[in-house]
DNA sequence: AGGCATTCGTTTCATTGGAAATGACATCCT
DNA sequence: AGGATGTCATTTCCAATGAAACGAATGCCT
């Protein structure tokens, strides 16, 4: 079978290529890693988030959040403080500088994304949107058996090593 | 803006999740890296390939090919020899063991992929296919205006030779 | 033919990224 | 209460990754 016709390959490769276009903006031009970019995105939307809500809303695991937050804090784009109610948790908030940066970068990223997406016929664009949404549902249904009958479903970042 | 509604984010996250399902098969269960998997895929299709054709047909850069080939050779799944006509190039060929492994793994990977894809309504599946193809074209047209259509896009090599 | 520049694949080096280990804290259970 | 257990963020360790450096080989050009 020719690999170019294998759907999973095509999806992965196209998604990567698209992503690379955007990384060129927030990464190469503004020095943000993908995790930092996403974290900043979340925080500019929410203003402030504690680590619990954060882990529920992102595809980032704890380690990634920890590292991205650390770097963003160093750069002065977010603040990080221990949460009073549960001192194991953290509360993250975006700073004015962070908001400023994000808005600027977001404009550029969105422009680049639209430049590509608008080059597609409207019908194809709608199809893509529909298809991605459906695939998302299919994967979710697959990995988290509907109704949660299964007591064990894979949680990101969990391993079943018994010590 | 909520990040979940930002299309580039959704695409990246869904594609990653889908890919992860497949990596779980060829990676976790069979010890192949993504690059090794792709290289093996190419070689089982072509039987033999020299490094020139290889670089034209894949999204892998030189370093990735070199490393993946090295490991596959160590495992006895491919052979690698200097090309007579141009001794800078290499000729890769899949071995019987490699073909054997690939067929076995491919069956599992395909099954897993179909398990997910078949869970989607046929219309959504068609939409996804159409959308991905269109996005591929849009990116190709964007990065390489007016060149060959199809699944070819940029390789991250940015050799800015001075002069 | 013989230098110069180019094109390869591979190696090196510094950085990244993931998985397990760690330590702080909270919760449970008796 | 208070020890055992669980949960969290962070750190540590090591494999993987990417960019630049390198050495070998070829093409070009006079």
Image (spheres, coloured by chain):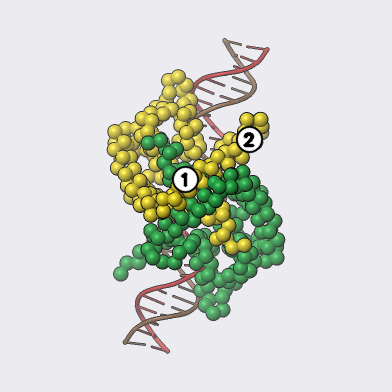
Chain colours: A yellow, B green, C red, D brown
Contact (Cβ within 8 Å) of mark 1 with mark 2 = no
Tell me which numbered mark, 1 or 2, is placed earlier along the sequence.
1
Residue at 40% across / 35% down in the picture?
B2
* Tag 1 secondary structure: helix
Query: How crowded is the residue under tag 2: few (<14 C-alpha within 10 Å), some, or many (20+)?
Result: some
Q: Position of residue B86 (x, y in %)?
A: 52, 77
- The local crowd at label 1, few if under 14, some if 14 to 19, many if 20 or more residues have their Cα within 10 Å, is some
Q: Assign the N terminus of chain B to one quadrant of the image.
A: top left
Q: How far from the left and from the top, in percent, is residue B37? A: 60, 57
Chain letter behind tag 2? A
Seen in the picture, residue B127 relative to A44 is either above or below; the reply is below
Residue that numbered label 1 is attached to: A129
Q: Do the residues indicated by labels 1 and 2 lie within the same chain of the protein? A: yes
From this view, report whether residue B17 is shown above or below residue B50: above
Measured along the vertical axis of the image, is residue A130 above or below residue A62? below
How many labels were placed on the picture? 2
Residue mark closest to the camera, 1 vs 2: 1
Q: Which mark is residue A36?
A: none
Question: Element type at marker 2?
Answer: loop
Picture coordinates of residue B82 (x, y %)?
Answer: 57, 74
Residue that badge 2 annotates: A145
Q: Residue at image x 31%, y 36%? A: A99
Please say whether residue A79 is visible from this viewpoint: no
> Residue at 62% across / 54% down in the picture?
B32
Where is residue B27 drawn, in percent x and y? 62, 50
Vertical side of C29 occupied by B160: above or below? below
Chain of the residue under the numbered disc 1 shown in the image: A
Residue B147: quadrant of the picture? bottom left
Q: Is residue A89 left or right of residue A110?
A: right
Residue sitting nearer the eye, B95 or A41: A41
Image quadrant where one finds the C terminus of chain B: bottom left
State the residue at coordinates (62%, 62%).
Answer: A1
């Amino acid at each position: 079978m020719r690999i170019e016709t294998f759907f999973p390959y095509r999806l992965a490769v196209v998604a990567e290529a698209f992503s690379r276009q955007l990384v060129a903006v927030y990464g190469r031009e503004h020095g943000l890693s993908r995790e930092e970019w996403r974290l900043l995105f979340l925080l500019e939307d929410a203003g402030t988030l504690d680590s619990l809500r954060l882990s529920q809303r992102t595809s980032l695991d704890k380690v990634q959040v920890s590292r991205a937050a650390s770097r963003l804090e160093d750069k002065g784009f977010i603040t990080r403080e221990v949460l009073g109610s549960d001192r194991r948790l953290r509360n993250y908030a975006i700073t004015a500088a962070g908001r400023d940066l994000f808005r600027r970068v977001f404009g550029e990223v969105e422009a680049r994304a639209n430049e590509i997406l608008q080059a597609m016929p409207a019908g194809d664009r709608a199809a893509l949107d529909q298809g991605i949404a459906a695939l998302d549902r299919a994967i979710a249904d697959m990995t988290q058996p509907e109704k949660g009958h299964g007591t064990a479903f894979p949680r990101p970042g969990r391993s079943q090593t018994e010590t």
